[in-house]
Amino acid sequence: MKKRNIILTISCIALLALFIWYADGSFDSYQKRILNLCAIYVILGLSMNLINGFTGLFSLGHAGFMAVGAYTTALLTMTPESKAATFFLEPIAAPLANITMPFFMALLLGGLLSAFVAFLIGAPTLRLKGDYLAIATLGFSEIIRIIFTNTQNITNGPLGLKSIPNFTNLWWSFGTMIFTLVVMIALINSSYGKAFKAIREDEIAAESMGINLFQHKVMSFVIGAFFAGIGGGLLGNLLGAINPMMFRFILTFNVLLIIVLGGMGSVTGTVISAFVVTSGLEYLRVLDESINLGFIKFEGIAGLRMVVFSTLLMIVVIFFRNGLMGTKEFGWDKFFNFFNRRPFSKKGVGQ
Amino acid sequence: MTFDLFMQYLTNGISLGSLYALIAIGYTMVYGILRLINFAHGEIFTMSLYFAFYGVTVFSMPWYISFAVAILMTAALGMLVERAAYKPLRESPRITIMVSAIGASFFIQNLAIVLFGGRPKAFPNVRLLTGVMQIGAVSLQRLTLIIPVVTIILLYTLLFLVHKTKTGMAMRAVSKDHETARLMGVDVNRTITITFGIGSILAAIGGIMWGAKFPQIHPVMGVMPGLKCFIAAVVGGIGNITGAVIGGFILGVGEIMLIAFLPNLTGYRDAFAFVLLIVILLIKPTGIMGEKISEKV
């Protein structure tokens, strides 16, 4: 059985690679961009799900970690010439001006710096619980944004960074996505992952079982932030321009939305819902444009898309509380059991 | 810094703090009763400004009638949000309700952009409120003195309401324990709706005075004050009305003083609130006036 599953997984990845190869050659840039965004949101969703869904820490600091990753990666990959052109108000601080690194190194450093920031933030705040933790992490994420707005000679302040080289392509984003998936699944099935889930279910019970609460919480927080930083780095180098206003609370909310819709504590749910939400937001763009039906013409109302989107969100949250998958996962065994089960026999699915 | 200048800053800080206090009361009451951060509160605040704006400019009502109507409409909106977004989720896990709250805030914000347009609008100028007066060498808008007075009056009215009336007793009972309150014959849903109504009325009064003080309104203006006022509520001790007012004053005066004494840090003005929040959470997580809650196994 185990062998079959591995073969199936590998063939799925091969199929995905084939699809990317096809898409890379024949899709237009708009479609490619949406696919890239989907993959990046999978990374972000997984990283947030590790913290919020699997460990049960209600953290709202994701935008801050993404900002750290995005700025680090962007600053390390920009050429000295484009840096000189971007920082026209105040020249960039000395050591950064001439550094240019390969994308991989920059991405890794972005993730590591973000993880380090998370460690600094987590050490004091992870003693808090529930709503207090949520609001404290939200506060830290806002502080990071405000600092980035004010450090003119490092981040170019409110003007943001422009002409960031577009290193992010489908291979990078989907490759990182697969890497994140593999790491997450391995982590969740390890003894650490079991400890995370125990903390989520009941902190006191977990502690009395000998789990070091603080250490595990910090670990989950730091790993989550590492992948959030990488996701942010990919996003920055995909868009080509970033500024502090991008990393407002609304960005955290988008990611939170993905994990809530997909199911808190479900890896596969996050993957599916990241794709649905990201591409759905693009399809709803129709609402913002004028619709011409021949005999009647509707003027497009700018912003209607977001109203419809938030309405849909409210409906899902109110009527489907556990999201798409709850804490369940999609797995090959379940998939085959679904087809093999006999409706009236007593042997149900995994009962 | 001369004494006059200091007094000028202090009065400004106190009046800003009073505005924060009024909005913070709404947060603290809702949190006290539902254990929920009402993320839509900032948006309710924004909508009160738009109601007042349209009352004066489109329906050309005199300002006092327009403001009164705006306050009532905001109260209705607050209760509507509670009924639509929070009531169906009463028994759900905390995070779901929180997402619903953020969703409601997001919805109202986007609706405001569609209905009113994203461009900032000028809030009507009311001479009676914005006129300038002189006290010694300090020149002030009348508003700067009116705001704290209104806040203190409202605070005492509210304290009377909560501690001396039957509705207030019901509120206190519900905030302790929903089930027990229900067994004692309290209509829990009605009490919660009333709480939202009162919180929204205070947000509307604060909002209108905010509009008179900073006469520019736009659909996302409520986000920052919303977050800051929640922080004020946490600093004062969440669930405690007097605490929220104290937290509001600390935040308002602190913010203005930061700018006054350290003009270099003006860009970090918004960060002050968050730093204060984190410091308070680390030193005394229950806030200045909050009660200590012990954890039961």
Image (cartoon, coloured by chain):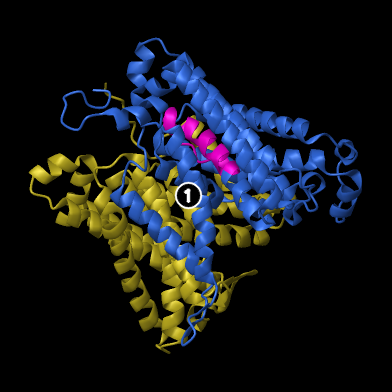
Q: Which residue is most to the top?
A: A210
Give residue A228's position: percent from left, percent from top.
60, 36
Image quadrant in which you'd find residue A183: top right
- Magenta span covers which residues? A39-62
Q: Secondary structure at mark 1?
A: helix
Residue B115, above or below A237:
below
One can see residue B126 in this view: yes
Give residue B282's position: percent from left, percent from top.
50, 31
Name the residue located 49 percent from the left edge and 69 percent from the top edge. A287
Residue B271, above or below A328:
below
Camera-nearest residue between B177 and B109: B109
Give residue A99's position: percent from left, percent from top.
87, 36
Camera-nearest residue between B51 and A339: A339
Mark 1 residue crowding within 10 angstroms, few (<14) / some (14–19) / many (20+): some
Residue A326, above or below A212:
below
Give residue B265's position: percent from left, percent from top.
71, 49
The answer to whether residue A61 is magenta is yes
Q: In this rendering, would A86 be left or right of A60?
A: right
Image quadrant in which you'd find residue B83: bottom left
Residue hosting label 1: A276
Dominant SS type (magenta): helix
Which chain is tinted blue? A
The hue used for chain B is: yellow
Q: In this rendering, would A10 be left or right of A30?
A: left
Q: Quadrant of the N terminus of chain A?
A: top left
Q: Quadrant of the C terminus of chain A?
A: top left
Chain for disc number 1: A
Camera-nearest residue between B199 and A168: A168
Q: Which residue is most to the bottom?
A: B60
Image quadrant in which you'd find residue A336: top left
Name the residue located 46 percent from the left edge and 22 percent from the top edge. A5
Name the residue located 54 percent from the left edge and 34 percent from the top edge. A47
